[in-house]
Image: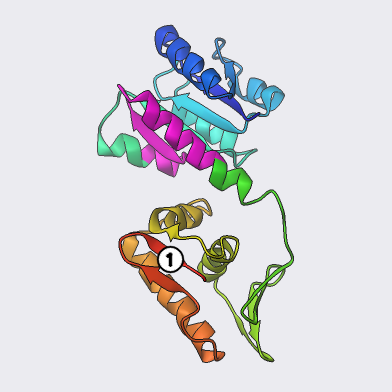
């Protein structure tokens, strides 16, 4: 069971969200003392944090920085603030997502599920290499090999190819691919993703393997 730590001083919102998450089989830890949040985080060891910005004593930005200094746990900001600068600050401080109040509980649950899936499911099993259609991806040194030839991958290319090779036969959405790169603390837009995929395709093609990564228009990419 995944554990979620909820740092929200509005008791009504905290209760509604906690009850909803428990119905989805999440273990919810509700913070009610706001002066020792980092210590409670260390004791709780949650898989994900829901964090309000307006809190007693220190705000959510402060606590996000404190948590980020010791952990890469996913953090979702929940806030009634709606200015672009608030969202930018939340992400720059280390947040993974920002949801404005009032919010739809189904949307919140979906975002939590997606973040947990990307953070933990993809990392459960560390495989030293992936092999498909003769192409070998070496996880230990970020290189690819095909019929005796090899090439080095950039950080982005490695992240994308590993994600695709973990999901052979399945379409990986552009949103999931951008999130995978975002999780590595890089800002990635739609155009940057396209550039990285095209560079990866060229490196594989130069080794002699054509049409390894397929595009599904409006959906994403896959390796068949």
Residue 164 higher or lower than 195, as above or below = above
Decide which of 77, 105 is in the foreground and name it.
Answer: 105
Please state, as top left, top right, bottom left or bottom right, where the N terminus lies in the image. Answer: top right
- Is residue 98 covered in magenta? yes
At 46% across and 84% down in the image, what residue appears? 202
Percent of width and height locating residue 48:
56, 32
At 68% across and 29% down in the image, what residue appears? 45
> To which quarter of the image does residue 98 belong?
top left
Label 1 environment density (alpha carbons within 10 Å; few <14, some 14–19, many ≥20) = many
Decide which of 99, 94 is in the foreground and name it.
Answer: 99
Q: Is residue 97 left or right of residue 84?
A: right
Question: In the rendered image, which residue does mark 1 sit on?
Answer: 221
Decide which of 127, 81 is in the foreground and name it.
Answer: 127
Percent of width and height locating residue 211:
46, 82
- In the rendered image, the residue lying farthest to the top is 11
At 66% across and 22% down in the image, what residue appears? 39
The region drawn magenta spans 89-116
- In the rendered image, the residue lying farthest to the left is 83
Percent of width and height locating residue 200:
48, 77
Q: Is residue 102 visible?
A: yes
Q: How is the image coloured?
A: rainbow
> To which quarter of the image does residue 43 belong?
top right
Label 1: element kind = strand
- Is residue 85 covered in magenta? no
Residue 123 higher or lower than 110, as above or below = below
Q: Is residue 57 visible?
A: no
Percent of width and height locating residue 53:
41, 25
Q: How many marks?
A: 1
At 59% across and 65% down in the image, what residue appears? 162
């Amino acid at each position: 069971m995944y554990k979620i730590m909820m740092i929200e001083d509005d008791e009504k919102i905290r209760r509604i969200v906690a009850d909803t998450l428990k119905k989805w089989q999440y273990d919810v830890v509700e913070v009610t003392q706001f002066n020792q949040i980092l210590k409670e985080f260390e004791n709780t060891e949650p898989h994900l944090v829901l964090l309000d910005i307006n809190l007693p004593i220190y705000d959510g930005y402060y606590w996000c920085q404190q948590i980020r200094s010791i952990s890469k746990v996913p953090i979702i900001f929940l806030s009634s603030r709606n200015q672009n600068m608030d969202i930018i600050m939340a992400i720059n401080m280390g947040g993974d997502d920002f949801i404005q109040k009032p919010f739809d509980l189904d949307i919140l649950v979906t975002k939590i599920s997606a973040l947990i899936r990307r953070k933990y499911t993809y990392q459960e099993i560390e495989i030293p290499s992936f092999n498909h259609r003769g192409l070998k991806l070496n996880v230990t040194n970020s290189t690819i090999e095909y019929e005796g030839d090899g090439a080095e991958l950039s950080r982005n290319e490695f992240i994308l190819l590993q994600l695709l090779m973990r999901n052979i036969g399945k379409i990986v959405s552009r949103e999931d691919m951008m999130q995978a790169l975002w999780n590595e603390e890089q800002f990635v837009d739609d155009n940057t993703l396209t550039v990285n995929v095209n560079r990866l395709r060229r490196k594989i093609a130069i080794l002699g393997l054509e049409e390894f990564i397929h595009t599904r228009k409006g959906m994403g990419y896959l390796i068949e």
